[in-house]
Image (cartoon, grey):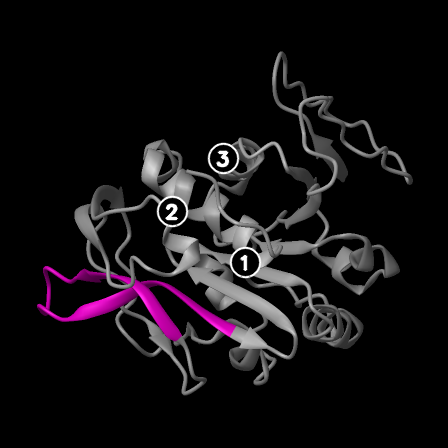
Amino acid sequence: MRYPICFGIIFVVLAGCRTDRVSEPTEASADRTQSKKVLIVTGIDYPGHKWQQTAPLLAEAIGADKRLEVTITEEPNDLAGDDLNHYDVIVLHFMNWEVPDPGPAARANLKRVIASGKGLVLVHFACGAFQQWPEFVELAGRVWDPNLRGHDPHGKFTVKITDPQHPAMKGMSNFETVDELYTCLTGQTPIKVLATATSKVDGKDYPMAFVLDYGNGRVFHSVLGHDVEAFASSEVKRLFRNACAWCAGLEPLD
């Protein structure tokens, strides 16, 4: 199921309604000279991650920047389609838990589209997507290692902005959130860490947000966003909104 997200007056999802062709989202107040299209790919995850609740909140947070036109697809297999070229930023908000990932065609298409100059944003357990694809770490920068300790107990912690000069961190300062502090990422791909948090379990700092280049494309990866409470944070909303603007080649708003 794929549907555009329009914000302003009413947001309604018609259950069971499916169309093959999606009308483009409209926003009268958007600056059309800078308008960019964002596709959120969701639809499946670990059962503890309620994507049905968090995906709309993520879309709302991103769409608060009226230059960003947000569409949600609940079909990860859409990553294999030609329509992927029509979007400026792809947001991965899924983890193919106990089901096959979208497959070789989707992998190759995603690599091609991002390398061509599009943006990629990874949210929370998207670090665990494509477990059977070793090259995913080149796109994601860091990936979930099931052999490592997963995260601190769910609770409050402080996210520290380590690179406030980076455009994606515009307007941001250290903030508290209630979330899962991931300690399970691995990989050797060069990344630039933008934010960290200190584990209450082992006292070590772990990356909460980082960026990298992939070909001509920009990639932003944050492990924040476990549940509805996590997205209640205005700073978490700003983080992903800034990320999408930056990945699309726009200056994030104040």
Q: Amino acid at mark 2?
A: His
Residue at the top extreme of this rendering: 9
Q: Quadrant of the C terminus?
A: top left
Q: Amino acid at mark 3?
A: Ala
Q: Magenta: predominant secondary structure element?
A: strand
Is 193 in the magenta?
yes
Above or below for 137 versus 197: below
Q: Which mark is residue 151?
A: none
* Whole-percent x, y for residue 221 in the image: 45, 62
Whether residue 34 is in magenta: the answer is no
First in sequence: mark 2 vs mark 1 = 1
Q: Position of residue 3 (x, y in %)?
A: 75, 35
- In the rendered structure, which segment of residues is drawn in magenta? 192-212
Residue, disc 3? 61
CA separation, marks 2 and 1? 15 Å
Count residues near mark 2 (Cα–Cα under 10 Å), then give few for <14, some for 14-19, many for 20+.
many
Question: Is 204 placed left or right of 34 in the picture?
Answer: left
| Left or right: 32, with 239 as reference point | right
Please name the residue shown 59% across and 51% down the image.
44
Residue annotated with mark 2? 226
**Crowdedness near tag 1: few (<14), some (14–19) or many (≥20) residues, C-alpha within 10 Å:** many
Question: Disc 2 vs disc 1: Cβ atoms closer than 8 Å?
Answer: no
Tell me where residue 150 sits by quadrant.
Answer: bottom left
Identify the disc placed on residue 121. 1
Residue at image position (73%, 41%) is 33
Marks 2, 1: nearer the viewer: 1
Instruction: Write the residue at 65% across / 75% down.
Output: 216
Residue type at mark 1: give it.
Answer: Val
In the image shown, does 93 or 30 lie closer to the viewer?
30
Residue 78, horizontal then vertical, whole percent: 78, 56
Q: Nearer the viewer, residue 192 or 132?
A: 192
